[in-house]
Image (spheres, grey):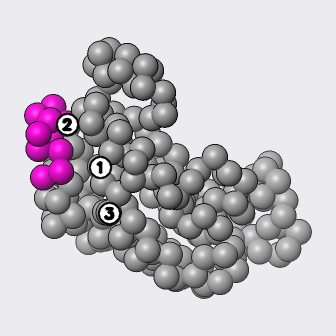
Amino acid sequence: MAYDSELLGLAQQSGCKGVFVGIESVSQSSLQEANKYQNQVARYRGVISTFHKHGILVEAGMVTGFDNEDTSIFPQTFEMLRDIGVDLVSFKILTPYPGTEFFKEMEQAGRILTYDWELYDGEHVTYQPARMTPEELQAGHDWLRRKFYSTSPILRRLFNVAKHPLMLLFSAVVNTAFHFIEWSDSKR
């Protein structure tokens, strides 16, 4: 959509105020591992900027835990998301959902850690990561969510959309809600 100026203009005219973009990872290697060849890390900043110029917020879908990733992926992800100007993020842990090829691969390799299906929600580690412990993956995921939705990064994001009053209002409400969700989750 960001590459189709006519479609983007029509979306803006229709009142579109936000899009969900499956960025998935800030690592081109991870994207290749997931067969997401259409995602190009080098283009992220331009895509986000294009949406913002049309008054459209961007929520990114991000996944961590690919086999080529170690614990350095967490600060790299935070820095990239901050630098490219993403407004909101849905952070998920790579999950081998039952019935998928990925699940079959992990099961055959003996890497499935639990068959408690309630934990297969993208928020819990359910398989043995290749280059970090399950505890490191969980802690890194949780840190990334808390860091992205902490006060200073939220204020920076709000400043970036201040020239668009509706974007500012929506971003303020949603970022504040996520901030308090993360704060209350960290108290449990």
Count all numbered tags in the image, as a single digit: 3
Q: Which residue is mark 3?
A: 83
The stretch drawn in magenta includes residue 161:
yes
Q: Position of residue 54 (x, y in %)?
A: 28, 31
Are dots 3 and 1 in contact, CB under 8 Å? Answer: no
Q: Is residue 161 above or below residue 181?
A: above
Magenta range is 159-168
Are dots 1 and 2 in contact, CB under 8 Å? Answer: yes
The foreground one among 131 and 113 is: 131
Q: Which residue is mark 2?
A: 167
Furthest toward the right, the residue is 108
Q: Which residue is mark 1?
A: 87
Report the Cα–Cα distance between label 1 and label 2: 10 Å
Amino acid carrying label 3: it is Asp
For the stretch drawn in magenta, the main secondary structure is: helix
SS type, badge 2 = helix
